Image (cartoon, rainbow, N blue to C red):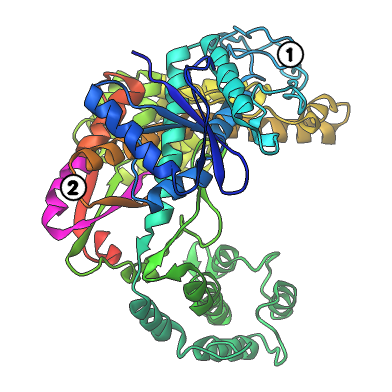
Amino acid sequence: MDPMHIVVAAAEPGTWSLRVVSADGERAGEDLTLADAELPALAARRENAAREAGVPPPVWTWRDTSVLAPLLAAAGVWVTRCRDLSLCATILATAATAPGSGAPDAETGEPRPLDYRAVVEPSDSRHVPGPRASVPADQGSLFSVASETGPGVAELAAELAAQTRACATARNPARLERLLGLESQGALVAAEMRHRGIPWDPGVHRQILEDLLGPEPTGEERPARMQEFAERVRTALSAPTLNPDSPVELLKALRNTGVDVDTTRAFKLQEWTLVNGQPQEQRVAVVAPVLEYKKLSRVFSSTGWHWLDTWVQDGRFHAEYVVGGVVTGRWAARGGGALQIPKYIRDAVRADPGRALVVADAAQLEPRVLAILARDDALAEASRGRDLYESIAQQGRARGAELTERSHAKIALLGAMYGATSGAAGRFMPQLTRMFPRAVGYVEHAARVGERGEQVCTYLGRWSPAPGPEWFEVQRAVDTEAGERRATRESRSHGRFSRNFVVQGSAAEWALAWLGHIRRDLHRAGLAAHLVFFLHDEVMVDCPEQHAEQVRQIVTAAAEHAVRTVFGTVPVEVPVAATVVTSYADAK
């Protein structure tokens, strides 16, 4: 039995219009208008009624989950499923420009059935297609909900119907529908995590800052230790009036002192200190104060007192996640650096008294996903129940080959996925190809497709964006040697992007499923436990101490369920290491 959709749209300020419809947008009940305070109660009644009747719960269908979900979370109402029409529209609009997606072409309305994996590379490597047609802004309801201003319930119902039709013509409708469901579920998780917040101890945070920077400064002053190193930088560079916060001034002072660099980035300064691969004492002495100042400056600007006062309220850091904020489907964050909690500040992430944090991360996620995508039995065997990189190194030692160290295996496999062709990664690539020809061949083919300006897709059907018109102009401007070099450079760059897109994007789909299973299973267990943090392949659950072990088991089991949800039954494991701590600093 297919679930019904309850479409929710903004009406007058403080009120909402609701309509019950089928997936194809057909009305299945009378419209309702509810006030803010009435909507959570109705949602709870509908969820409970479905559970008692043993029928699928409704799919709450709205334009933007981040608007409605906080209202429900504040009232303590849990909904099972939603459909975020804006997020789904973004996925479908990109698919509609891809030959092979099966989604309707924006101009003709006809499916584009060509499978990208069947494309044969043209004999003329410079013969590239023109740019794909973008989805017109005035196309109507089809995939355009994100650009509309205040659509009503009828418009949202029409958008749902258009999306349902588009999925039906896709290359694999079931997979694409699953992706849209996972993306929408992710939006629910993100909104609930923001509402709950990460437990944060301001006192511990302030002590860390004082230990690193000195007492909290007043006004525009630098912290004491930063000021101390500012003076050291001026002395080392013989620049008594230097403002070390100015990249232009700092670069000029460095060059005047004989530091031959073209940027003030820390890694370039560290490279300059090396002579024949070894640190040179006199060079280190010049650059060391600059590096220390830059490190303290990052602490002060990214997690200093101003950050603490801005982002931590009532002992919680309420991070704002952007679901699908990266084109591969990975999340981003809007302000506060939620995806970059540095190690030095993690001790401030503390569970409240009587509670614990369950922190879990997936081991070597992307290489394992590559084994699934490529159906590489050898790589799948290497991944089962063990450290994948060490397993590859053991195979290398058994073959008497050069790739015999764990670090070498990691460099080689990541190089294959990210397109590194020089240095150690390039040196080990021939052996990696002999060991895992299907895996290497899979990403190499994705790279060739990208180099032609074609789009590639993830396992469930998220398509990469096509290059813009400028890219195609560069590919055709090859009448000079410089133009040929630029075209080759841009082509290879897009190939590196598409090579990684298929793996990173499919791994992001697994992560969405992992989050969804954790959310569902915590709720089913009736525990006062909540997801509060997510970073690509890592999660944190805040729970009562007495339930920590049960939560740990739920989080671990959810990883296995996620593999089946996204990929079906496959001979690849995604092991998850989960620990129970009271401080995030103890989880690593």
Give the image location of residue 112, x and y in percent: 63, 9
For the residue carrying disc 1, how many other residues have a C-alpha within 10 Å: few (<14), some (14-19), or many (20+)? few
Q: For the C terminus, which image quadrant? A: bottom left
* 528 in relation to 212, above or below: above
Q: Is residue 563 left or right of residue 301?
A: left
- Foreground disc of the pair 1, 2: 2
What is the number of the mark on residue 356? none
Q: Nearer the viewer, residue 486 or 35?
A: 35
Label 2: which residue?
Answer: 552
- Which residue is at 42% across, 31% downward? 182
State left or right for residue 588 relative to residue 414. Answer: left
Q: Quadrant of the N terminus?
A: top left
- Binning the other alpha carbons within 10 Å of mark 2 as few (below 14), some (14 to 19) or many (20 upward) gives many
Q: Residue at x 36, y 83 (%)?
A: 207
Quarter where residue 432 is shown: top left
Q: Residue at x 52, y 39 (%)?
A: 324
Query: Is label 2 in a helix, a strand or a loop?
Result: helix
Identify which residue, 490 or 557, lies in the foreground.
557
Where does residue 566 sit, x and y in percent of width and height? 36, 25
Badge 1 is on which residue? 124
Magenta highlight on residue 423: no
What amino acid type is highlighted by mark number 2? Arg
Residue 310 % position (x, y): 52, 71
The residue lying at 63 percent from left, 87 percent from top is: 220
Point out the stretch of residues depicted in magenta. 535-555
Q: Is residue 471 visible?
A: yes
Nearer the observer, 292 or 478:
292
